[in-house]
Every structure is written in C-alpha cells, then in structure tokens.
Amino acid sequence: MVPFFALFSQTKAEIFYLTGKAKLESGQNDSALYYIDKSLELNFNNPDAFLNKGLALYRLSQYKMAIQQFDKVEKASKGEASIWIARCYAELGDASHCVEALQAHLTSNYRLPESTLLLDPALSKLENDPQYIDFWKNGSWYTGFDQTLAEAGYLTKLKKYPEALDVLSDGLGKGYRKAPIYAKRAEIYMLSGNEKLALEELTKAIEFDRKNPELFTKRAELLYMAGKYKAALEDYNAAIKLDPEELRYTIGRARALSKTGNYDEAVNDMKNYLQYYPGSDSAWYYFGMINYENGNYFDALNCFSTSLKINQKDARYFAARGATYLKTRTYQYAWKDLSMALDLNPNDSESYLNKGIAAQNTGNMDDACFCFEMAKRMGNKEAFNYAEKYCK
C-alpha cells in the first residue's frame, strides 16, 4: 500500500491516525478506535486507517464490523486484508466465506507461509469443517518458491545454516524471486555471525526490490554496526520515504543522525517517536544514548530513569545510567546501578570496569580491584591500565 503521508509533515488527520496506530500496538483497542475515527473524519479515504480500524474491531470481537473495514482496504489494495476477512469469517463459523477470502489471500502478493496458516488460531476453528478440509486437500496454493523458503526457514531454526544456504542457492538456480531469497540468505549469515556477507546479500536483495522499506532498514542496521553511519542514514531515509507512517524506522535514523553530527535532528526524531510511544522503554534508552554521546548527561539520566521506570529487567538500562552517573561524578549512584547491571548480566566487562572506577572513587579499593580483575579476564584492555595503576 502506498503511504498517504507527505515526508516530514504531519497534518491533524495524520497525528490522529498515528496516535490510533500507536494505541492499537499497545493493546488499547477502544482508544485506537477513537483516534482512528477522528482521523477518518478529516481524511475519509485512508486505507491504512481502515485496516487498523478493522484490526481494532477484530480484537474487540466485532467481526462483522471489522469485515466492513477490511472490505474497504481490499478495494484499494487487493489481497492486503483478505487474511483478516478469512479470520473474521472463521470466528463467525462461516466456512464458505472463509475459504473464499482464503483463496483471495493465497493468490495475492501478501500470502503467508502455509505453516503459518495451518497453525492460525482463528482458522483452526474450522479445521473439522468439510468445506475447509476440502479447500486445503484439493488446492495447490504453494509453489516451489514457497517450498524453498519454507525448507530454508525450517533448517535455519535447526541452526543447519550451510544446508539452508544450499537450499536457497538451488532456488536461485531455478529462477525463483531473487529479493526474498537474498534477504533470507542475509538473515542466515547474520545468525552465523558473518555480517560482511549478510550486507552483501542485502545489497543484492535491494537491487531486485527497491520498494521494500524493511530491506533498507535491515541494511541500515548492518551499516550502523559496521560504523558506516552516513550510509546507514541514507538507508534509513530511504525506508522512511517508502513508508513514513512506520515510526520505528525513525529510532534507527535518530541514532545514525547522532553519529553523523546531527544531534538536533536526532532529538527531533526521538521526540516525535516518543510522542506516540511514551511507554517504549527501548526508545527512551536509545534517546538516552544519543544524549550521552553528545555530552548531555543530565538529559541522558532522565531518559535512562524513564526506561527503568518501565522495565527493570534490562541490564543495558542500569549499565547506561551507571556510566552516566560516572560522568556526573555521582559515584555512589553509579556503583549501585552498575551492581544491578552485573546482577542481570554478569558477562559485561564494561560494567565491571565502570563499577571498579566508581568503587575506586568512593574509596572501596578491594571492590575496585576485584572489578578491574574481572574486566581484565573478559579482555577489557582499559581494565589492565586501571589494575596496573591502582591495584599493585
């Protein structure tokens, strides 16, 4: 579906829609309906809003009303909502209309893998219906291409990476669609720890599908990991241009903007995201890291503290706040946070180093030397200098 937003601008209708979408993703279905309806009052022909309104109604078990919204989506983008129409009819016990919608789904570009459909909780309600059984028994819905991806996916789950790559290579030799196969190969190389080859495969995938924002985002993540921040920024911009309503892309762009010296723009991206997703602990963490990188330690502390109010099970949040407390010379607070970080993740050499520095500055040299020694054992080079200087 072609996004209806103009890049970098948000009208009132768009703000209402994005708020509704965020509420839906947070499980607040009634609130989602309210804001999406407000957006439709101002922009009454937005297929994305119809789709998300249908999803909210589906979750509220209003299946007939949901079908009305999904039908509007189908008129604009054939096949996009057909699976949801099938699910609605399955919930209503209407096998005839369910298989009709399933057929539309299986002949569309939005077709889900066979294993996904056969295990679908809603569709499974018709698993004993003769018409539903006959539909699957007599239909030939999946091609050799689909079977290739399914087999590669199964082998990948078993961590049989060479075998999965061989299956995909065979698929390329048979002339199957290249972009999804290269993307799957990239995923396998990432899982096996070969970021270089993963990047090469994603580049090939993009050559054959330049309208897929997910491909650009995945390549941007790899480029960012490789320290190629300008190239990563270009890919994030490409993804956002293709799908401006997917605000999670802006988190990655904000991080790339920060690394390329565009701090103010990075802050704007993060503020825009958090306007709609204030309960995202990971977003507050990344916002904190952007502030930390740019020397705004008190703003960083506020961000990390917000992350920890939402989620105290992620070691990164304690480690980041502890490292920031070190920068503000509040060593006791730093020591406490870094202790919490190490309780959650005892294999973090950087937290051991920082905890040692905090302990040293509060006069606890026994603990400081213990921490420096632990960091040394984990290969932290800076810890050797501290141990040499303070622990003879």
Image (spheres, grey):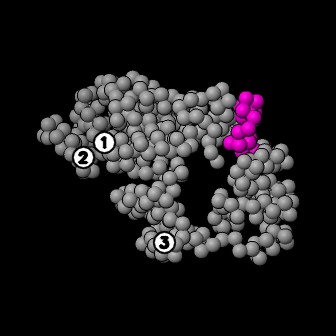
Give the mark toward the camera: 1 or 3: 3
Residue carrying label 3: 172
Residue at 49% x, 38% y: name it: 250
Q: How far apart are marks 1 and 3 (CA)?
A: 44 Å
The crowding category of the residue bearing disc 3, from other C-alpha atoms within 10 Å (few below 14, some 14 to 19, many at least 20), is some
Pinpoint residue 313: horizontal percent, then vertical percent: 49, 41
* Mark toward the start of the polypeptide (1 vs 2): 1
* Mark toward the start of the polypeptide (1 vs 3): 3
* Mark toward the start of the polypeptide (2 vs 3): 3
Residue carrying label 1: 350
Q: How far apart are marks 1 and 2 (CA)?
A: 7 Å
Residue carrying label 2: 380
Q: Give the magenta range.
A: 36-54
Pinpoint residue 130: horizontal percent, then vertical percent: 85, 72
Is residue 40 depicted above or below 191 in this figure? Answer: above
Pinpoint residue 95: horizontal percent, then vertical percent: 85, 63
